[in-house]
Image (cartoon, rainbow, N blue to C red):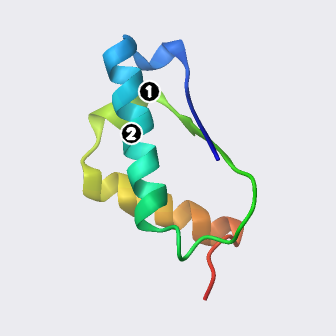
């Protein structure tokens, strides 16, 4: 899996924080995600949202894409 943050996200500290947030979401859901190669891209809004909202959006996106294992 790859975790990417664009320079639009902010300075280096903000980009690293956004990648760490994505990694923690994936690790907390790794048993529920189908195996495969994925690239997760952090957008600018990730730093302005609460962790609960990010988690809800992440789970919704995985469900919508059909990547969750039942």
Q: Do the residues labelled 1 and 2 touch (CB within 8 Å)?
A: no
Which numbered disc covers residue 20? 2
Q: Residue 18 carries which label?
A: none
Residue 39 in the figure: left or right of residue 30? right
Mark in front: 1 vs 2? 2
In the rendered image, the quadrant that contains the C terminus is: bottom right
Element assignment for label 2 = helix
Instruction: Indicate whether 14 appears above or below 7.
Output: below
Q: Nearer the viewer, residue 2 or 63?
A: 2
Q: Residue furthest right?
A: 36
Residue 31, image x and y in percent? 53, 75
Residue drawn at the location 62% of the way across and 75% of the way down:
68
Residue drawn at x 37%, y 43% as measured from the top left? 21
**Residue 52: % across, % down:** 27, 58
The residue shown at (32%, 55%) is 53
Residue placed under numbered mark 1 in the picture: 44
Depth check, front residue: 8 or 70? 70
Q: Which residue is drawn at 70% across and 72% down?
A: 66
- Give the residue at the far bottom of this rendering: 70
SS at mark 1?
helix
> In the image, is 48 to the left or to the right of 55?
left
Q: Horizontally, is 57 left or right of 70 in the view?
A: left
Q: How far apart are marks 1 and 2 (CA)?
A: 14 Å
User: Against 17, is 56 above or below?
Assistant: below
Q: How crowded is mark 2: few (under 14 residues within 10 Å), some or many (20 or more)?
A: some
């Amino acid at each position: 899996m790859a975790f990417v943050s664009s320079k639009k996200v902010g300075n280096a500290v903000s980009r690293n924080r956004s990648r760490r947030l994505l990694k923690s979401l994936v690790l907390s859901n790794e048993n529920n995600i189908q195996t495969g190669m994925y690239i997760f891209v952090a957008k600018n809004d990730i730093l302005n949202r609460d962790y609960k909202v990010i988690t809800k959006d992440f789970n919704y996106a995985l469900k919508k894409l059909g990547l969750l294992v039942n």
